[in-house]
Image (cartoon, rainbow, N blue to C red):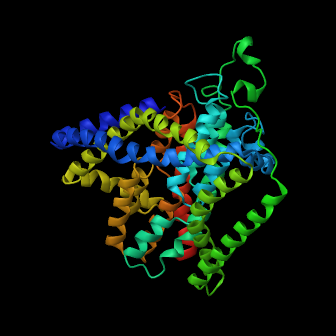
């Protein structure tokens, strides 16, 4: 499906740009997207990948990943029945989900790429997405977040009276999109068009899962008795920091208490992880510096591997954006969009939200620009602004996520990951409108 969507985006951009007399702008946008893909996305990702893959190496060597996977085994087994319970992929996926929920985008992407690498080690059909990969992508594209910090910041900058009012609606909408996304991915994998073909007998019966994946079980030494006071002091210190951050927010009612709690957790999450992983590994007598460097080496390789996939999707998106911006100046385009807006209004969909809903799965920067322009036009305290902010907080840049995650493991046949992700996005948009009407109207 991604083949047809990518080709469709390119052809729409060229045709629309040609009719609007803006083919030069479309071509320039393609070249600019190539530069952006490498200089603004891939290169910064190298450092982030090195940092978090180094930390994941410490967590894996110290047995933390195994402990985490065991603690949530019943929940994860239902979502990912094809993944062995003790496999490192379970812990990597959990770390990614936690980072996404806390809004830690800089950590979530490297951890998600690590999870895809772990899942690929279980893949007996190289180049084809497994059911576990598609489920993991559906969860990512449904975008569970406790606090959509970026969207809240945009609304605050626009002068909203209560910019944090969208936190509850965004959480409700993203909960709906996640449930529908997981349901869709589980149903789609059973359809004949997406069902995996049987494997030859020699491949159908591989060795034990962990041996087949090339990942030995954790051999970390048990934590010595003298280490427990150090861990206790560490947790007490971060508990004190949490209390200080909570008091600084000065919550006055139950809503502000929830917001202050989520904000304090988001503030302390990265420092906690960056210090806890090395400390725990050191207490287990693991050479932390050496192991961190070994894990960080993988960051460069992964970032380079995804560059072609980034260029492909960013070029198509850049061309479409340039073509639509050029066509928007003509009366015939305004008439066409006006007809669409009238049809949407008849079913209760605010026409002002259409550009944002269409751009959100394609481009994060593009949807941010549309969102900022929209709240400037309608006002940050309007119902439309609250709907738009809820959409931003409950949906994800689906095509970017799919291109980066699958590109990191050279998966070209994405199977049902794209339709499941788009279904989750559509649900997030509809749920955002319905919930905001109930809460703010």
Nearest to the observer: residue 57 or residue 263? 57
- In the displayed structure, 263 sits above or below 162; it is above
Indicate left or right for 201 with 272 as reference. Answer: right
- In the displayed structure, 41 sits above or below 217; it is below
Please tell me which residue is depicted at 65% across the width and 30% down the height of the picture.
191
Quadrant assignment, res 384: bottom left
Residue that lies at the very extreme toward the right in this rendered image: 225
Q: Is residue 170 visible?
A: yes
Nearest to the observer: residue 56 or residue 385? 56
The spot of residue 381 in percent (x, y) is: 43, 78
Nearest to the observer: residue 428 or residue 433? 428
Please tell me which residue is depicted at 72% across the width and 72% down the height of the picture.
236
The spot of residue 265 in percent (x, y) is: 62, 68
The spot of residue 432 in percent (x, y) is: 53, 63
Nearest to the observer: residue 187 or residue 174? 174
The spot of residue 322 in percent (x, y) is: 25, 46
Q: Is residue 423 visible?
A: no
- In the displayed structure, 291 sits above or below 203; it is below
Indicate left or right for 304 with 274 as reference. Answer: left
Please tell me which residue is depicted at 46% across the width and 33% down the height of the picture.
2
Indicate left or right for 236 with 436 as reference. Answer: right
């Amino acid at each position: 499906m991604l083949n047809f969507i990518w080709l469709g985006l390119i052809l729409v951009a060229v045709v629309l740009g040609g009719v609007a007399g803006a083919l030069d702008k479309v071509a320039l946008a393609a070249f600019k997207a190539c530069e952006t893909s490498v200089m603004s996305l891939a290169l910064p990702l190298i450092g982030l990948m090195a940092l978090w893959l180094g930390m994941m190496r410490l967590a894996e060597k110290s047995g933390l990943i195994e402990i985490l996977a065991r603690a949530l085994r019943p929940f994860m087994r239902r979502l990912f029945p094809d993944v062995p319970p003790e496999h490192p992929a379970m812990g990597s996926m959990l770390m990614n989900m936690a980072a996404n929920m806390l809004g830690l985008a800089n950590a979530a992407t490297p951890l998600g790429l690590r999870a895809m690498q772990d899942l690929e080690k279980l893949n007996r059909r190289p180049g084809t997405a497994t059911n576990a990969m598609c489920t993991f992508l559906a969860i990512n594209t449904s975008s569970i977040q406790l606090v959509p910090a970026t969207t809240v910041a945009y609304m605050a900058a626009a002068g909203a009276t209560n910019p944090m009012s969208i936190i509850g609606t965004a959480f409700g909408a993203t909960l709906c999109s996640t449930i529908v996304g997981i349901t869709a991915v589980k149903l789609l994998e059973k359809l004949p068009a997406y069902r995996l073909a049987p494997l030859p007998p020699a491949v159908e019966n591989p060795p034990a899962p962990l041996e087949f994946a090339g990942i030995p079980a954790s051999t970390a030494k048990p934590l010595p008795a003298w280490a427990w006071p150090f861990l206790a002091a560490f947790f007490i210190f971060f508990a004190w920091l949490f209390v200080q951050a909570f008091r600084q927010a000065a919550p006055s009612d139950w809503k502000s208490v929830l917001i202050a709690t989520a904000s304090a957790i988001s503030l302390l999450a990265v420092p906690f992880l960056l210090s806890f992983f090395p400390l725990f590994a050191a207490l287990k007598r693991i050479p932390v510096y050496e192991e961190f460097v070994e894990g960080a080496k993988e960051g460069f390789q992964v970032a380079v591997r995804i560059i072609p996939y980034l260029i492909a999707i960013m070029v198509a998106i850049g061309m479409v954006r340039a073509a639509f911006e050029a066509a928007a100046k003509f009366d015939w385009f305004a008439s066409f969009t006006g007809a669409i807006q009238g049809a949407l209004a008849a079913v209760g969909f605010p026409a002002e939200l259409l550009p944002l809903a269409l751009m959100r799965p394609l481009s994060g920067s593009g949807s941010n620009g549309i969102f900022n322009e929209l709240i400037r036009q309608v006002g940050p305290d309007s119902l439309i602004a609250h709907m738009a902010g809820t959409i931003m907080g409950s949906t994800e840049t689906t095509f970017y996520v799919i291109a980066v995650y699958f590109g990191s493991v050279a998966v070209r046949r994405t199977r049902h990951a794209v339709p499941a992700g788009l279904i989750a996005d559509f649900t997030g948009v509809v749920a955002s409108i319905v919930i905001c009407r109930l809460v703010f109207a």
